[in-house]
Amino acid sequence: MINFKRTRLTTTLITAAVILQACQTTVPTYFQQVDVIATQQAAAQTMAVTACNSSTWQWMIGQPEGVIAGVEVGGPVRVISYNQTVSMENDPTRTNFYLDTANRITRVTCG
């Protein structure tokens, strides 16, 4: 005689496995490509911020403008005088030196 409890349990388990397999989601190729692009852009931004490395130049705050010419920054440099108009473009590799009215460095940033 066949044990109906055992057969019913086996059938229930197989049915549950089939239903769970049908519910399994897969990521479409498009979204996988978008994720790769976003990861590459984040890596590029991290590298760009590292290229500027404004934290290295914080010791220059309070120094006269002439100190800037004496160091090799290793990328584009923009010296911004007091009340000078500047463009809104952002270059993460560029180091910005802000000057006060006495031409002393007040702030060093990337951008």
Image (cartoon, helix red, strand yellow):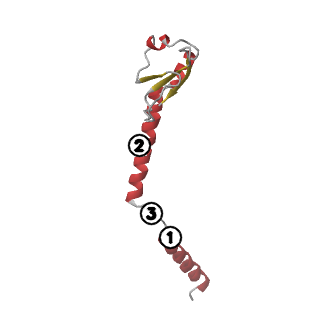
Q: Residue furthest right?
A: 5
Which residue is drawn at the image coordinates 58% and 82% (left, top)? Answer: 8
What kind of residue is marked 1?
Answer: Cys
Task: Give the Cα distance between marks 3 and 2.
Answer: 22 Å
What kind of residue is marked 2?
Answer: Gln
Secondary structure beneath label 2? helix
The foreground one among 15 and 29 is 29
Give the number of marks. 3
Residue 104 in which image quadrant: top right
Secondary structure beneath label 3? loop
The foreground one among 28 and 63 is 63
Quarter of the N terminus within the rendering: bottom right
Residue for badge 2: 40
Q: Is residue 104 above or below residue 94?
A: above
Residue 109 in the image: state x and y as whole percent: 52, 27
User: Badge 1 local density, few (<14 within 10 Å), some, or many (20+)?
Assistant: few
Which residue is drawn at the image coordinates 53% and 15% (left, top)? Answer: 103
Residue for badge 3: 26
Q: Residue furthest bottom?
A: 1
Of labels 2 and 1, the one closer to you: 2
What kind of residue is marked 3?
Answer: Thr
Residue 100 in which image quadrant: top right
Q: Earlier in the sequence, mark 3 or mark 2?
A: 3
The foreground one among 85 and 2 is 85
Residue 12 in the image: state x and y as whole percent: 56, 79
Residue for badge 1: 23
Q: Is residue 61 above or below residue 28?
A: above
Q: Is residue 107 above or below residue 49?
A: above
Q: Earlier in the sequence, mark 2 or mark 1?
A: 1
In-image side of 84 versus 75 (left or right):
right
Secondary structure beneath label 1? helix
